[in-house]
Amino acid sequence: MTLLKLTLLTLLSTTIYAQQSVQIDMHGGKEVKMPSLLGSDQVKKEKEVFYGKILEIKPAMGYQYLKIDEEGKSIWIAIANTPVQIGDKIGYDKETMMTNFQSKTLNQTFKEIYFVSDVYVPKKPSAPQSMKEMLGLNSTKPFVAPKTQAVTKPFTQKSSYTIEEIHMWRKELANQMVAVEATVTKVSHAIMKLDWVHLDDGTGQADIFTNDLIFTASSTNIKSGDKVIAKGRVIVDKDFGYGYFYKVLIEDATFEVK
């Protein structure tokens, strides 16, 4: 599943979009912007992304109240109208929580509910192409199969590797510590409680995605453009769920800025 973020964040290798300034139906139809909800019964949460499955949806005047299964625990969140359905797996923040919140529109009091400013929803797959479309028979631009082939050469144990080599030798390097000298191209913080760092060293091929390598760490203070020596453990065929699958990535990373 490809996730979409509704404001900020292009996570890893997926496409995401975002929404901001969720408005909550607090008094039976009166729209109150999020800052107006601040009160003594509100608890601020550190902003990070949580994930769960939608069990129930209650629409209310432009908003949606979602019952979520989050690792076996049921919680309620409120979001602006978003194209979701029961069974979808979504991501969300817990920056703002209220207790004993009453929705007059729903005639329901929520013991605890999170008002979400950033929500990540599954991208719905488009209709499959017909064979004629895939072959370009209905188009002036005929289908052309990719010509690029991954570079292959015998595995060699080394003190450091290029990004292309780590992709090429990922199975041989599985669970081993490696070092790479490269440039930071993107940093995404606090996603699934990790920082995600994309590196590029000029090797590899963009059309087969061997020019980019992701390193994850509990926290980092590097930024895009930094030239670093990165070290970490090679993990292959990593499946985080929610559509996040990687043939190779580097975990427990450390970075030395050059």
Image (spheres, grey):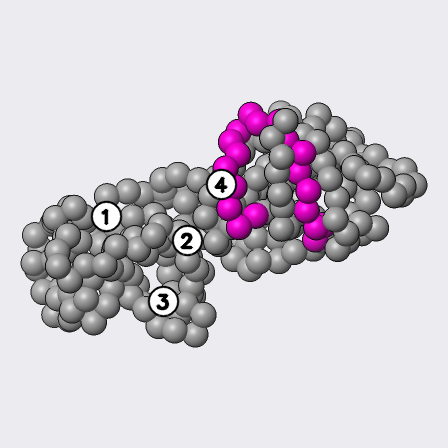
Residue at the spot of label 2:
49
Q: Would you name the residue on which mark 3 appears? A: 68
Residue highlighted by disc 4? 188
Q: Residue at x 63, y 46 (%)?
A: 253
Residue extent of the magenta highlight:
217-235
Q: Is residue 85 toward the left or the right of residue 224 in the image? A: left
Which residue is at a point 23% across and 68% down the rendered structure image? 112
- Tell whether label 4 touches label 3 (CB within 8 Å): no
Mark 4 or 1, nearer chain start = 1
Mark 4, Cα crowd under 10 Å, few <14 / some 14-19 / many 20+, is some
The Cα–Cα distance between marks 2 and 4, rounded to whole angstroms, is 12 Å
Badge 1 crowding class, 10 Å Cα cut-off, few under 14, some 14 to 19, many 20 or more, is many
- Mark 1 or mark 2, which has the lower sequence index? 1
| Residue 81, placed above or below residue 214 | below
- The answer to whether mark 1 and mark 3 are in CB contact below 8 A is no
* Label 3 to label 4: alpha-carbon separation: 25 Å
Quadrant in which the C terminus is drawn: top right
Quarter of the image where one finds residue 102: bottom left
Which of the two discs, 3 and 4, labels the residue nearer the N terminus? Answer: 3
Earlier in the chain: of badge 1 and badge 3, it is 1
- Residue at numbered disc 1: 22
In the image, what residue type sits under mark 1? Val
Residue located 9% across and 65% down the image: 104
Q: In the image, 131: left or right of 71?
A: right
Image position, residue 172 (x, y; %): 83, 50
Residue shown at 8%/59% (left/top)? 28
**Vertical order, 71 against 90 (above or below):** below
As measured in the structure, the alpha-carbon distance from the residue carrying label 4 to the one carrying label 1 is 23 Å
Depth check: give the residue in front, 159 or 35: 159
User: Percent from the top left, x then y, of residue 81?
Assistant: 27, 51
Which of pointers 2 and 3 lies earlier in the amino acid sequence? Answer: 2
- Disc 1 on helix, strand or loop? loop
